[in-house]
Image (cartoon, coloured by chain):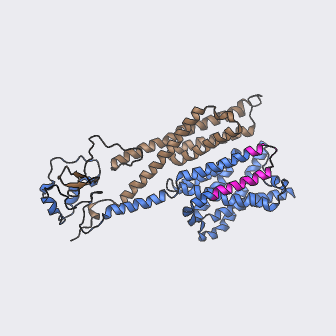
Chain colours: A blue, B brown
Amino acid sequence: MTDAAFDHPEQPESNGDARLSGDGQRASLGPPLPSQQMADDATAPSQPARNFCPRCGAPWDPSWDDCPHCQRQTVVTASNAAVTNGLRLRTGLWLYFLLLGCSLIGSLLLRDTSVDEADVDITLTVAFAAIVSIWTAGTWRTLRPILSSWSSWRWCGVGVVVGLGTFVVATLFIEGLVAWMGIEKLSYSPPLLEGGYGWLTVILTVCVCPAVFEELAFRGVIFESLRGIMGVREIVIVSALMFMILHLAPLNFPHLAIVGLALGILRVRSGGLYPCIVAHFTHNLLVILEEMRALT
Amino acid sequence: MSKVICPHCNAQNTEGAAFCEACGKAIPTSSTTPRVIEDNETATTATGQELQAKQLRQMSRRAVGPLIFVGIVNLAVGILFLFVLEGSGRFSMSSADCAALLVVGTIFFALGIWARSNPLPASIVGLVLYVTLIVVGAVLNPESLVQGIIVKILIIVVLAKAIQAGVRFKALKAEVASRALCPVSAQETPVEG
């Protein structure tokens, strides 16, 4: 079938987009649409009947209010955008650098011998918790599914086992470092006990708060900010490495990376945050119990 | 609203229409020069998208050089102080600090190797680690901040641009995949009657 309205000597230069080859598409569609006759006779500069969508070039049906092809593409693109833009990368990076600043301010304060170390520790913990809480509140819509994932409770038992495993790995590593390089082992409870605080404060400051807020930060906000721009495997690795770096102890990097990876894998497999919090709490609690045993 | 005349069938179309409503052919832009894709735009054709993806991939792979460079420098300094200048007095460094340098150098080197296949995550971790080290160094010894500041700024800029290119590359892939889910083809056209 030839159509005089479409026999033009100047064809548009193909740029590889199949949608531009209107003739090829129409030829395979069978009989022309009813509105085609109006376009054939249209010579006056008035708006012709619509035969093709002006946005995507798809053949138009007169009964349509909107093009289903563009609309579907917009919906698909929008849903992809929702996944990729759930949390932006900069949200996670800002949180990380704020927490880094918090740690560095604490390090600077600790260099001043007139400042009580226990007060600095507690202030740092409170500041850390406040920053993470603000970020969690701001990203609540994204974090709510993982925080309300009740099916992950059965994974809490797995979290206890993971916490025990990471404690064993960390202890072996640190004992090896102490034996090989003669460095002093870091203790967390003596500064707080010497500052007049009890074991309850030690457990809250060293076990509960780091478990809850570090997991909210790394396996929560930062994890979700990386989703959409990399695969799950890369997200676990990157969040583990950022967790490792924030502790600012290069000699502890290897075992911190292992802990971070274990917590990341637990986060992915369980689909929730509570097993990671339980694992982290178990790890830190075992550290404090070890210190308690050494002190008594 | 101004009208656009289709050069193929002379039909009138509304301004901004990409395809003629009468004949379905693409309406060329008024510019006679090739359409230039700006930084924040996505190419509309398959060839353009391929070229754009290739360019973004090349930009994100630029992180390999700085990461390996920083890794080698840290490793070299750590080895130098640990084995060569050990016990030489003024230029000595504790074994713990040397070990720390070696650990950091190894991590940067490993990130550089990883960046060859997966530039985006390696660049993110590399930038985070590098900025952390600079900030910590500045806090412990403020004079160290200005030492080699031009090189430090260059490395940070290259890593940041690599991350930006990597994120745009992923977004481009997602957009191309979403368009592939809804191709405009004869098979999908609901012809009635």
In the rendered image, which quarter is residue B106 located in?
top right
- Residue B125: x and y in percent read 58, 47
Residue positioned most to the front: B1
Marks counted in the figure total: 0
In the rendered image, which quarter is residue A226 located in?
bottom right
- Residue A174: x and y in percent read 75, 50
- Residue B136: x and y in percent read 67, 41
- Magenta stretch: residue A123 in it? yes
Classified by dominant secondary structure, the portion drawn in magenta counts as helix
- Front-lying residue, B157 or A290: B157
Magenta region:
A108-133
Q: Quadrant of the C terminus of chain A?
A: bottom right
What residue is rendered at 57% in x and 43% in y? B127
Q: Is residue B61 left or right of residue B7?
A: right
Q: Is residue A70 left or right of residue B11?
A: right
Above/below status of A82 relative to A241: below
What residue is rendered at 14% in x and 58% in y? A42
- Residue B15: x and y in percent read 27, 53
Please indicate, yes or no, whether residue A120 appears anywhere in the rendered image: yes
Q: Quadrant of the N terminus of chain A?
A: bottom left
Q: Is residue B111 left or right of residue B29?
A: right
Above/below status of B24 relative to A251: below
- Magenta stretch: residue B28 in it? no
Please indicate, yes or no, whether residue A248 appears anywhere in the rendered image: no
What residue is rendered at 59% in x and 50% in y? A94
Q: Is residue A189 left or right of residue B125?
A: right
